[in-house]
Image: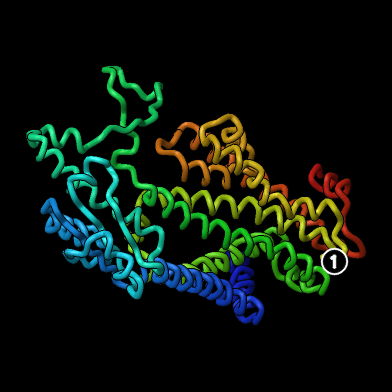
Amino acid sequence: MRNAMKVAKWEIKRNMKNKTFLIGLFLTPLLIVGFGLIGSWIGGDSDDSAEGDEMTVFINDEIGIIDELSQYASESGLDFRIEETNVEIGEVAAELEEAEDTAYVFLNEAALNEGVIPVYIAEDVDSFFSNQLAIFQAPILSYQMETLGLTEEQSLAVSRGIHFAEMDAEEITDDGALEDEAAGEDFLAGIVPAAFGGIIFISILFTGMAMFQSASQEKKDKIAEIILSSVTPEELMQGKIIGYFVLGLVQAAVLLVFLVPFILFTTDIPLFEYLFVPETLLFVFIAVLNYLMFAAIFVGIGATIEDVTTSGNFQGIVMMLPFLPFIFIGPVVADPSGLMAQIGTYIPFTAPGVLLLRLTMLDVWPWLEIGISLAIIIVSVFIFVRLAGKIFKVGILMYGKNATPGEIWKWLKA
């Protein structure tokens, strides 16, 4: 194990001094944050354009509720300046001819009886303004109900309105009451730990894929022969897996150093409150298992290639294995508890990615399925590490050509 750690340190130092690795290490998070800032600026400009300047709303109030309307406008956060006016409807055209960001509203008993309140706006006012006036419905309804002599309780019942909500019959409890799944649930409480695990998942996975090229390049440059004079093939393979795992964590850490302040600066999300929860440990554990499984495969197959540029279809197919979970995205999103989602959870190559996606979407975690899936992944890690060791031991010292699937099969049976 001591020699494996020496190899790991050598891999870390070699890559940390590599200009290409360092550029990618810092350029990727900078690009993500940069595009995020550009998007927020564009969104901010759009919001400013949509909101415009302060809107002056002149109200010809014949029913005496302008104070209530002013209060509602203030509490709603809309940029309205409410002013009372004696301008008649016939004079509005002249008043609006040179006006900007101005509207006239006429409140009287005739308008209330008809259910249509006349609103006249300047030419530069956005059409969305009429929808914003919906905030005045509550005080107007309150006035109408008071006029009709309704009690406070009756007025509250009428103003509350009625809406229809779809319910799942399977969620009915024994006492006949419906469970409110949405109560107390917070979407961010599930997505933030999953996103953190996903960042580690992707970072160390793509770093692990670099081992494929590293093993092949060292073999091509005859560096592997020099290293193997001091360590065994097993120690070399283990050192590479450990070293690139650390490099993946470094990439994830640098990305988070840039990303976390950006999120805290641009949003009101209590990120750390959602992040430091037990679920985060499970997501990180799944990401680490995923890395170990594919790292073993990549380093083993990489040792069978004489030159990356001449790798065959078999090696190319192996490189596509980490992307198999994308096949299950549609079925999992449509039904996280469905048959296809469960099948994806039990296939070694797809289990980590599908499990992360399912746990993000499910309100109640299926712990039995999680346990089975983790057991499958852990067993797969041990099997693939063992098989990769056999392939690496022979393949790293074979020169002149790429190994064929038949030759690899013979090595595995040996």
Along the horizontal axis of the image, is 341 left or right of 83? right
Vertical placement of residue 381 versus 66, above or below: above
**Quadrant position of residue 325:** top right
**Quadrant position of residue 247:** bottom right
Vertical placement of residue 354 versus 130, above or below: above
Of residue 315 and residue 10, the one placed in the foreground of this image is 315
The residue to which callout 1 is attached is: 309
Vertical placement of residue 321 versus 328, above or below: below
Give the SS element for disc 1: helix
Of residue 164 and residue 356, the one placed in the foreground of this image is 164
Q: What crowding class fits label 1: few (fewer than 14 Cα within 10 Å), some (14-19), or many (20 or more)?
A: few
Residue shown at 78% from the left, 66% from the top:
216
Q: Is residue 309 visible?
A: yes
Residue shown at 86% from the left, 48% from the top:
405
Q: Position of residue 214 (x, y in %)?
A: 73, 68
Along the horizontal axis of the image, is 243 left or right of 143? right
Q: Position of residue 59 (x, y in %)?
A: 21, 60
Quadrant where the image shows the N terminus: bottom right
Among all residues in the image, which is located at the extreme front? 90
Question: Please, what is the three-letter code of the amino acid marked with disc 1?
Answer: Thr
Query: Disc count in the image?
Result: 1
Residue shown at 64% from the left, 47% from the top:
326
Of residue 130 and residue 379, the one placed in the foreground of this image is 130
Colour scheme employed for the rendering of this structure: rainbow
Along the horizontal axis of the image, is 37 left or right of 406? left
Quadrant where the image shows the C terminus: top right
Q: Position of residue 392 (x, y in %)?
A: 76, 57
Q: Is residue 257 visible?
A: no
Residue shown at 59% from the left, 42% from the top:
351
Q: Position of residue 19 (x, y in %)?
A: 65, 82
